[in-house]
Image (spheres, grey):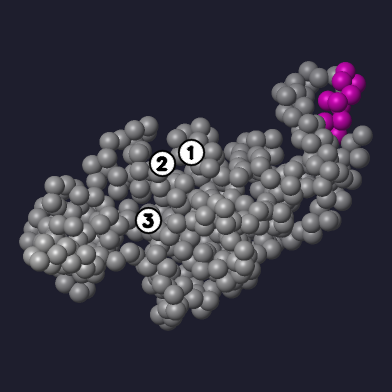
Amino acid sequence: MLQDLIRTVKSVPVTEAHGRVVALEGLRLEASGPPGALHIGAMAQIGGKDGRLAEIVGFRDDLAILLSCDDKGSVYPGASVRFLNEPARLYPSEHWLGRILDPFGNPMDGGPNLPRGSIGRPIDAPPPSAHARTRIYEKLHLGVRVMDLFTPCGRGQRLGLFAGSGVGKSTLMGMLAKGADADVIVIGLVGERGREVREFVEDALGPSGLARSVVVTATSDAPAPARKRAALSAMTVAEHFRDQGLQVLCLLDSVTRFAMAQREIGLAAGEPPTTRGYTPSVFAELPKLLERAGPGSNGTGAITGLFTVLVDGDDHNEPVADAVRGILDGHIVMSRQIAERGRYPAVDVLKSLSRLSSLLQGPEESQLIREVRRLEATYTDMEELIRIGAYNSGADPQTDRAIRLHDGLAEFLTQSESDPTDPQAVLTALTQIYEASA
């Protein structure tokens, strides 16, 4: 009888538990709590109702390891801790369109409080099962010539935008937000400089882009759990609109800073550092985040994901870039050399690839793109000789044609932020440039 009673008591879910701060060490806190009642990812409030929010990131013996999510209140040994032993949730609503919010769903644009939707969504929800997902057949017009032609994107596809600093990444994201043929744009700004958030919203995005967008942001001074949560919350908002049958474009800038936030969390929890200091949990969390984008099940919409990756010193083989490239359905490489020549967007068409090109382009278009790539590759191989005058015109017919094609193609692929494109007109123009080089 007593054993049955004990089992019954243990099976009752605990939605709230209490404890005390036991130790503070660097970024992490350690707190006591009832054994068996806590779990990783649960939130806690330190020092009363208006105190600091923290997240459980691990355990040591019978103590919970926490990291602060904000800097409210003061923390000291013996401070009370209230564990909210429920999964972190957001309540997205269509009224969030045109708004800027923090990772916890609070407004950051000075506007009124955001109305809560009727359904609470866990921010770390699993992706749809692989078997239930629909296949990708339909092309998504992005409104950027170089991408629509050389890295075609399907509705529900996931592309990586690999770029160093200062090559026009934010401008390109703004062009995509304004020009893409999507119903809703969800933008996650993870670890951005505070100054750049308003500049991106007002200049790169603009009123027309913001009107159909939800922006979730955590600046670079935010604690690691808040920066990580910004990416998860952006994906949660995108899932809300996807389940309403809408076509969603999710722009996340950047996956690298999400990985850096997870590295801080992992190190604080006691994980061993591996390559370049990244902890094993980083490479476990990346696919969980990225797989949430993609086509939905029958009767829902799709989340087309474009995830930026910051490459240290333009090293495109660093650990995060290498891991992300292996998960996504294509990669777009932005080149510093092209940006220095004044061609924007500075996309390197020879190094960029969409894994779904063959499904999204007809045979004639595919043949045209292959021929243009081949001639551009020829020009790149011979560029130094051409520039120093060591190549004699007429020595090689293919090189001669590549030279005639190159300048016209570079001018055609240069596109301003306010230059909308028509898909058929773009293809016709490229065909004319190619034929004129013959």
Up-down: is 239 above or below 369? Answer: below
Labels 3 and 2: the sequence-earlier one: 3
Instruction: Say which label, 1 or 3, has the lower sequence index.
Output: 3
Q: Residue at x 50, y 50 (%)?
A: 290
Alpha carbon distance from label 1 to label 3: 20 Å
The residue located at (33%, 64%) in the rendering is 87
| Residue behind mark 1 | 323
Q: Which quarter of the figure is the C terminus placed in?
A: top right
User: Magenta: predominant secondary structure element?
Assistant: helix
Q: SS for tag 3?
A: helix
Is residue 396 among what the camera can see?
yes
Image x and y of residue 97, in percent: 53, 74
Determine which quarter of the picture holds residue 192: bottom left
In the image, is 3 to the left or to the right of 121? left
Mark drawn on residue 283: 2
Q: For the residue marked with disc 1, what is the amino acid? A: Ala
Inter-mark Cα distance, 2 to 1: 7 Å
Looking at the image, residue 320 sits to the left or right of residue 46; the answer is right
Spot occupied by residue 246 in the image (x, y as percentages of width and height): 61, 68
Mark 2 and mark 1 residues within 8 Å of each other at the beta carbon: yes
Q: Is residue 402 magenta?
A: yes
What percent of the width, then of the height, locates residue 10? 17, 63
Q: Quadrant of the N terminus?
A: bottom left
- In the picture of the structure, the residue carrying the numbered disc 3 is 227
